[in-house]
Image: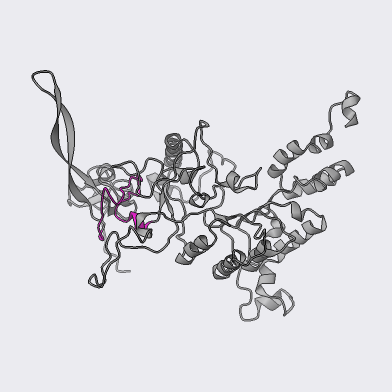
Amino acid sequence: MGTFCDGLPPSLADLLTNTLILRQTAPYLPISALRNLSRTSKALHYAIFQSPDAFRYLDLSTVKSAIVPFDGPLDVGGISFRAERMDESLTEDDFYSGPLRHILNRLEKFHVLRNVHVLVLDKLSVTAELVKELLTEERFNVRILSIREVRHLNERKLQQYLRYAVRPSRPAGTPRIKGLYLFGPCDPTPRPASPATKKSPGLASRGVMSSQGAQIGAQWNQKSQHALDAALSRTEDKWYQPSGKIIPKRPSPEWAEVLQTCEGIIAFDAVLCRGPRHDPSKAYVPDATTSGTHHPSSFLRPTIATVALGPSGCETCHSSPEGPALFGYSSPAHHPLLSPVPLHGSSLRAAQMPHTLDGSAPPPLIVRCEDCLRGRWCERCHKWWDEDCYAGSAIAQRTELQQTELRESIRPDGTSHLLPKQTVKIIGVRRDCFGCGHTCISCKELFIRTCKKCSFEYCHEDNDSSSDTMCDWCNYTSRRTLEMY
């Protein structure tokens, strides 16, 4: 720090010796940049490898040496395996986890492996045995682990290892991993903008909707919808917005049991559905007389919630029977780990806390599984009705309900009184279009048309060749031929 006394500006080594600057800067640098920077001088080598903050956040998903060069079956008839000239004692786990184990061993030799608190291994070859080592071995000190969209992961073995790691007879202070990103999609990587003059192959042969102007318009519409959802929900976190299906692939029922077992010990980027059908005291238990039929309120096994409904609640009562989860007041098990993975923190609070646009209190969280929303959730506008407002049905058809609205009337003497007004409100959803999914009556009026020629209904958005008055079949004016094959 003598350069400050001599009146000279601080050097890069002086800045990186500041713990606050290094902790805020290091997560944005790849591991190769940190390695190359440490080779420039002894001062920088000491500042990077002797500080516990340089490798607190470690993202190996962009490291080329961590990618398995052979992405196929390990042994196809004994040809590909021997072509690699490998040892016959090499196991499948050693082969697929070899690149990651090599990197972790190198970090252990540099005495920085213990400083890694957040480890990102998205889209890499990660085996269940490697995750078990991260959970149980003392040489690792990882608090938050991300293994989203990884390959060669045996889920059944991982479920067994997680149950073993949270067993009641486990050693004190274990497991060190407190958060596991597993179910959600990876964080999107920014891509460079393509030139405006560059066109994709076969663009002209795919219709007007595939033109460059239509694609740009669709992208802007999607961005506008995301901005509107963020403004209404006061946050950009997808779990707290009416985002619909937040988990693309529905997890198996065994994962719901694992989340129950790990509750309070390991948090995930998913939560269990808290709908009334999952509560034995509130759900309807069918007896022997209901042979083969499922009541709309029958009991459901524990299921992972995959649909984000937003903070507004039911379309009719603006609430939910189970009550929304409020951050800071509800149990931490009711809040999922939010994406992206925190850069500057390794605690569960940093990974679960939603960030609002105006700095106000976080909005309420309402999530459900698809079975609890069957027949009562619009997949286009994300409106939904709870069990008290709409019982639903097994075939998920719309139902016309007579609801009484009160309107104010003025008597001749000047006093006011309420008069009942009978109105008909159609609630519930129905699959009118296979592309749109189950939609409400409002969305049907916007997108479903009746062809004036054949009188059949069609979706104006999914049928590219259709018009406002005719379907794609009647609007197609060319000569039709019958193709047998």
Looking at the image, residue 259 lies above or below residue 448: below
Residue found at x 27% / y 62%: 295
Left or right: where does residue 142 sit relative to residue 268?
right
The part of the image, by quadrant, that contains residue 283 is bottom left
The part of the image, by quadrant, that contains residue 151 is bottom right
Q: Position of residue 182 (x, y in %)?
A: 55, 57
In the image shown, does 371 or 122 lie closer to the viewer?
Answer: 371
Left or right: where does residue 401 sit relative to residue 166?
left
Res. 311 in view: yes
Q: Position of residue 472 (x, y in %)?
A: 27, 50
Q: In which quadrant is the C terminus drawn?
A: bottom left
Q: Main secondary structure of the magenta part?
A: loop
Left or right: where does residue 64 sit relative to residue 339?
right
Instruction: Write down the region rendered in magenta.
Output: 370-395
Verify whether residue 388 appears in magenta: yes
Verify whether residue 333 appears in magenta: no
Residue at the outermost left position: 412
Looking at the image, residue 345 lies above or below residue 228: below
In the image shown, does 85 or 333 lie closer to the viewer?
Answer: 333
Count of labels in the image? 0
In the image shown, does 23 or 483 lie closer to the viewer?
Answer: 23
Res. 217 in view: no
Residue found at x 49% / y 35%: 361
Q: Position of residue 279 (x, y in %)?
A: 37, 59
Left or right: where does residue 36 sit relative to residue 422?
right
Q: How is the image coloured?
A: one colour
Q: In which quadrant is the N terminus drawn?
A: top right
Looking at the image, residue 182 lies above or below residue 211: below
Q: Position of residue 244 (x, y in %)?
A: 41, 49
